[in-house]
Amino acid sequence: MAAEWRPVRQARTHELVLETIEEQVLAGQLKAGDRLPPERELAPALGVSRSALREALRVLETIGVLVAHSGRGADAGARIVRNPDDALGRLLRLHFGLGSYRLEDVLEARVVLERSSFEAAARQAASEDLDEAADLLVRLREPGIGPAEFNELDTAFHVAIARSSGNRLVSTLTAAVRESVRPLILRALEAAEDWPATAAALNAEHTELLRLVRAGEATAAADLAEHHIRGFHGTLVKDEPAERDGDADSER
């Protein structure tokens, strides 16, 4: 069904444009892969200025539902996409930085999500679905790996397990929550007194986690996932400045 465009009210124009596009998506008239009309056509169809339209499109691009390419050619213009992982991670990281959530809240969210994903992966993931996690584990064990690369691969390992559970929303939320504390975890890795020993200990748990998932030991995998998260992430909670909680509470 072709999308149907109509003029919007002029009050808070870019938000009204967002509402109109959202209505088209929810009605099934716009789907992933669909292109929006060119600005010169869409702006008058909506009865708004091109600057207001561009502001709305920038918001949609930020939240991961639209990608825009300038210029001419087949790729030019705005296209509806499904890209929630990076957008959710960015937004959650900003809100965490602003004190909207305590580090302890993020820890508990990780525990809930990853217990669920490791248990589900152990129960239903096919062997080939776990190949990505296995490949990442090989890279995590490479001699001389530094904290920054380890941090990236560590996140990818946990997300790969979540993805293999078959629940895309859980994998997206897992990625977003882990991404929100990535800078903090990196600083903690970099501050480790004995980095090679820290990396080896974390990888020993990664190895056992993957073994338990492959063996179908769902409860043991979930329990170890919680232990793994609380073990390192938990140290960040203990070190969280007390004033951070006070600042967050004062904003509520």
Image (cartoon, helix red, strand yellow):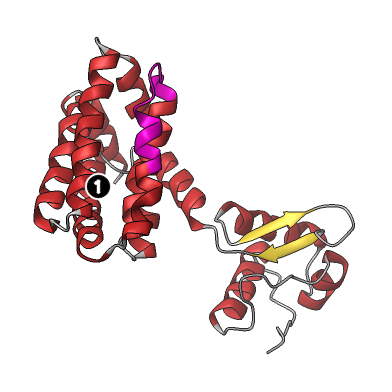
Q: Residue at x 77, y 54 (%)?
A: 69
Q: Quadrant of the N terminus?
A: bottom right
User: How far across and down, in percent of the image, does residue 235 sit?
Assistant: 18, 27
User: How far across and down, in percent of the image, does residue 57 sit?
Assistant: 68, 59
Q: Note whether 126 is above or below 131 in the view shown.
A: below
User: How far across and down, in percent of the image, does residue 79 sit?
Assistant: 70, 65
**How crowded is the residue under tag 1: few (<14 C-alpha within 10 Å), some, or many (20+)?**
many
Q: Tell me where residue 21 sits by quadrant.
A: bottom right
Q: Note whether 7 is above or below 96 in the view shown.
A: below
Q: Note whether 144 is above or below 124 in the view shown.
A: above
Q: Which residues are magenta?
A: 135-148
- Is 27 placed left or right of 118 in the picture? right
Q: Which residue is at the far top?
A: 193
Residue 125 among those drawn in magenta: no
- Is 92 placed left or right of 27 in the picture? left
Q: Residue at x 63, y 55 (%)?
A: 61
Q: Note whether 93 is above or below 1 in the view shown.
A: above
Amino acid of disc 1: Arg
Q: Is residue 182 visible?
A: no
Residue 146 among those drawn in magenta: yes
Q: Residue at x 32, y 55 (%)?
A: 162
- Is 46 placed left or right of 125 in the picture? right
User: How far across and down, in percent of the image, does residue 140 sit?
Assistant: 36, 30
Please state which of residues 113 and 129 is positioned toward the viewer in this rendering: 129
